[in-house]
Amino acid sequence: EPFHRTKGSMASEVDHLEELMGATPESEEEMERLRAGINDKFRYTEALIENQRNRVTGPGLPDFVLLKRGKEVMDSLRITESLMVERQTAVLRSQEAQGRELERSGPASCSAFWSVLLCVIALLLAWTFAGSGACATSREISAEQSGGVGM
């Protein structure tokens, strides 16, 4: 039956959706509401099917009660889905904006990094060579003061 096939595959579909959404407190809460709503919808649909099968043996809950409750559950599922789509759309827009900002600032940040690195290397080299020159000069001065020849 299509109903039982759908019911059997729904859990894995919802699990896959949960993986795609990521683990945040908001998404976990939404997924719990979604799972509860789906389970309710299946329960009321199953009751309607049983009512149709049991017409010969006696009345169950009136169909209009089950249909009304099933519609309420479906409306709730639509609201939950709409809120999930809105939140995920906002998350994606935020990530896209961050990506565009990185694209714009990426080359500038990279060139700034290399410029600073080159300046630091140049300063270290200058300090190293200046220090070597200063040492040689102080040695020469010491040698002259002691009356010896410069090294």
Image (cartoon, helix red, strand yellow):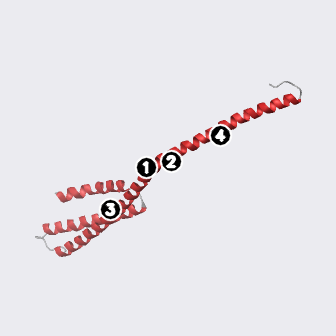
Query: Mark 1 sits on what residue?
Result: 103
Which of the labelled discs sits on residue 109, or is there none? 2
How much space separates mark 4 and mark 3, taking CA atoms? Answer: 54 Å
User: Which one is in front, 15 or 88?
Assistant: 88
Q: Position of residue 55 (x, y in %)?
A: 12, 70
Badges 2 and 1: C-beta atoms under 8 Å apart? no
Query: Mark 3 sits on what residue?
Result: 85
User: Which one is in front, 19 or 50?
Assistant: 19
- Look at the image and tell me whether residue 74 can be seen: yes
Q: Is residue 139 above or below residue 86?
A: above
In percent of the image, x 89 and y 26: which residue is there?
Answer: 147
Indicate the amino acid at tag 3.
Answer: Val
Q: Position of residue 130 (x, y in %)?
A: 71, 35
User: Which one is in front, 83 or 47?
Assistant: 83
Query: Mark 4 sits on what residue?
Result: 123
The disc, 4 or 3, on the residue closer to the chain's N-terminal end is 3
How much space separates mark 3 and mark 2, taking CA atoms? Answer: 34 Å
- Look at the image and tell me whether residue 62 can be seen: no
How much space separates mark 3 and mark 1, taking CA atoms? Answer: 26 Å
In percent of the image, x 21 and y 55: which residue is there?
Answer: 5
Position of 115 compared to 25: left or right?
Answer: right
Can you say which quadrant of the picture contains the C terminus? top right
In percent of the image, x 56 and y 43: which residue is there?
Answer: 115
How much space separates mark 2 and mark 4, taking CA atoms? Answer: 21 Å
